[in-house]
Amino acid sequence: MELPQRVSIRYKDTSYNISEIRLKTFQLAFKIWEEESKPRKTELYDFTLNCLKQFDRQDRFVVSYLFLELTDMIRNSSLERGMREVLIKTCFREFACALTDFENAEK
């Protein structure tokens, strides 16, 4: 699946295009491990929620696609298996919480 190149957002006074959004997502996912997997409201949650708020409705699938890329990247990494599992679960929770909070705010 090809990501739309027109997608861009602003986050903390910085503009991000689709490649930068992808990179920032990956960086924040690995930062979660350093933050000892704090539940919710990590910077990955904040960044994901910010993306959702700024994406056009037809481009919101990008968040799901980014998560699939992220899980593949973690799965294929040289991290220990238990660490990979925890990281994927934590990232999924952050994405899911951001998506749920975004949808609840739209109602």
Image (cartoon, grey):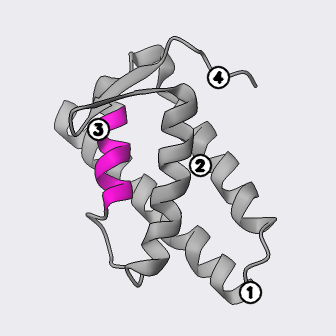
| Relative to 47, 73 lies left or right | right
Identify residue for label 3. 50
Q: Is residue 14 visible?
A: yes
Distance between mark 2 and mark 4 Cα atoms: 13 Å
Q: Crowding at label 1, few (<14), some or many (≥20) Cα neighbours within 10 Å?
A: few
Distance between mark 4 and mark 1 Cα atoms: 30 Å
> Which residue is rendered at x = 75% and y = 56% of the image?
72
Marks 4 & 1, CB-CB < 8 Å contact = no
At label 1, the amino acid type is Glu
Q: Nearer the viewer, residue 15 or 5?
A: 15
Span highlighted in magenta in the image: 43-51
At label 4, the amino acid type is Leu
Q: Is residue 44 magenta?
A: yes
Q: Earlier in the sequence, mark 1 or mark 2?
A: 2
Give residue 80's mark.
Answer: 1
Give residue 51's mark.
Answer: none
Distance between mark 1 and mark 2 Cα atoms: 20 Å
Q: Secondary structure at mark 2?
A: helix
Residue 82 figure quarter: bottom right
Identify residue for label 4. 3
At label 2, the amino acid type is Phe
Q: Crowding at label 4, few (<14), some or many (≥20) Cα neighbours within 10 Å?
A: few
At label 3, the amino acid type is Asn
Q: Crowding at label 3, few (<14), some or many (≥20) Cα neighbours within 10 Å?
A: some
71, above or below 105, in the image: below
Residue 8 figure quarter: top left
Q: Earlier in the sequence, mark 3 or mark 4?
A: 4
Give residue 67's mark.
Answer: 2
Distance between mark 2 and mark 3 Cα atoms: 15 Å
Marks 1 & 3, CB-CB < 8 Å contact = no
Q: Secondary structure at mark 1?
A: loop
